Image (cartoon, grey):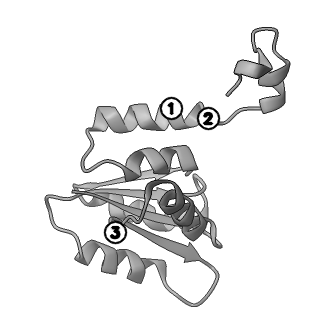
Amino acid sequence: MLKIFIASHAHFASGMKSAIELLAGEKDNIVCFDAYVNENDIDKAINQFLAATNKNDQIVMISDLYGGSVNQMMCKYTLIPNVTLISGANLALLLELSVRDSITSEELAKIVENSKSMIRVVNDELNSDKTNTADFF
């Protein structure tokens, strides 16, 4: 089964989980950790999360900011064979992952690429000669 651990600075992780559950329903396979909002320890939270998984689970860990302190703390868990770490969380990425039971590395790479394409300057899109605003969405 695909299990997801989201960690971020402040309440971004819990906010993303809340948005996912609003759009896709309750997700028992997603755990989030909001760093620096209390005395909770990310390593302890990750170890509790991992203890509730098994070697056949696919684990995707997601951080908010590549190279940030939360991402750096999560890097050591990539040594575990069934763990993949992705940074730069956005709702498109998390929503796509949340509806899957399993995923191949090729599918994961495509989802990451697709989520990148959701970051745009909307004004440019709306002002493009190619865009009919009535058909934009």
Residue 114, numbered circle? 1
Decide if residue 104 is in sight here.
Answer: yes
**Around disc 2, counting alpha carbons within 10 Å, would you say few (fewer than 14), some (14 to 19), or many (20 or more)?**
few
Contact (Cβ within 8 Å) of mark 1 with mark 3: no
Q: Which residue is mark 2?
A: 118
Q: Position of residue 122 (x, y in %)?
A: 78, 31
Q: Quadrant of the N terminus?
A: bottom left
Decide if residue 88 is in sight here.
Answer: no
- Residue in the image at 31% along x and 47% along y: 100
Q: Earlier in the sequence, mark 1 or mark 3?
A: 3
Q: Could you tell me how many numbered marks the image carries? A: 3
Specify the amino acid type for callout 3: Asp
**Around disc 1, counting alpha carbons within 10 Å, would you say few (fewer than 14), some (14 to 19), or many (20 or more)?**
some
Contact (Cβ within 8 Å) of mark 2 with mark 1: yes
**Around disc 3, counting alpha carbons within 10 Å, would you say few (fewer than 14), some (14 to 19), or many (20 or more)?**
few
In the displayed structure, 128 sits above or below 107; it is above
